[in-house]
Image (tube, helix red, strand yellow):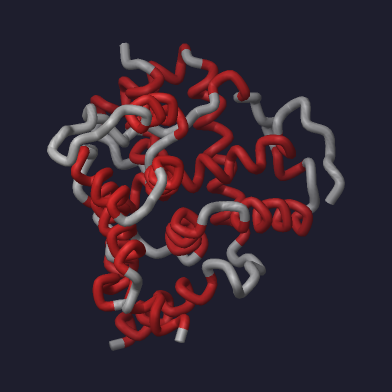
Amino acid sequence: VLDDQLNKIVSDHHQAGLSRPDTVLLDFALKLTRSGPWLSGEDIAALRDQGFTDESILETILVTGLTDSFVPCLQGWAQRPISRRGRFPTLRMRRCRTDAPQVRTWVDNPEDMYSEAERRRLVEHGIMMLPAMYRVVLVLRDIEQLSTAEAVVALGLGIPALKSRLCRARLMLREALAPHFAISAKRMGL
Amino acid sequence: MITCEEFMAEFGNYLESEVAAEVRSQLESHLSHCRTCKVVYDSTRKTVRFVTDSGSFDLPNETAKPIVAQIMARIRKDRES
């Protein structure tokens, strides 16, 4: 049953028998990932009408593809009364998070720090920690070696959305591995 | 000279070598003087190398595997036909 519903959600979530709030939430997420970098007050109001809190809306925006650097800005908007016809300030979604203050150089040959089995375990754990929507893209592109065109068709995404998620997934995995491979990193318990 | 944000906006395409020569030149110029972006770029390349060189992983079934398996089965079928 779950597989069947997943298939329906991937192909057309309107036909998947989801609740109205879940359908509206997916409409919103798809708009963010497919239709360009603009959010409107109406988009937010549609979610609020379905009972979503501003906090959960922010979480959805972040998971769908925006980056942490927008959070303060979005939180500021969430505190304002939004009229249905009012428009949010526009924002662009192209940026990736760099965590500049915490960036540490990696060793030249990270392969030498751990055995292949240990490194594989670290990478597996990092992949497991990714949000599902990013993990699927990374698995299809970097492990299953699908082309962009194949992955786009398989996931029903636009090319910009797919590339954005892949970039974000790789950066998140990098962050997960950084404590193990940065120059000052010591071998951590495995 | 491009900013770090502009660099990161093209980061995904640069990793995939999908940028025009002129853009590539700007990105590489930025990398030559921005330590933070250089570190992010180098370490992300190493990350991708870990993943692609490893070939396969033992990911638990309850994660992305069901949907990935379905997609891969569909694609393999399409490739065969």
B70 or A38, which lies in front?
Answer: A38
For residue A133, what is the image quadrant?
bottom left
Rendered location of residue A64, percent (x, y):
38, 49
Asked if residue A81 lies left or right of residue B66, the reply is left
Rendered location of residue A52, percent (x, y):
38, 51
Rendered location of residue A89, percent (x, y):
23, 27
Question: Residue A124: in sight, yes or no?
Answer: yes
A74 or B65, which lies in front?
Answer: A74
For residue B5, what is the image quadrant?
top left
Identify the residue at horizontal 27%, vertical 27% (top origin).
Answer: B23
B14 or A186, which lies in front?
Answer: A186
Residue B61 versus residue A94 in the image, above or below? below
A179 or A183, which lies in front?
Answer: A179
Identify the residue at horizontal 51%, vertical 76% (top origin).
Answer: B66
Identify the residue at horizontal 30%, vertical 41% (top origin).
Answer: B18
Name the quadrant of the N terminus of chain A: bottom left
Residue lying at the far left of the rendered structure: A85
Residue B60 versus residue A60 in the image, above or below? below
Residue A48 versus residue B66 in the image, above or below? above
Question: Residue B7: in sight, yes or no?
Answer: no
Residue lying at the far right of the rendered structure: A189
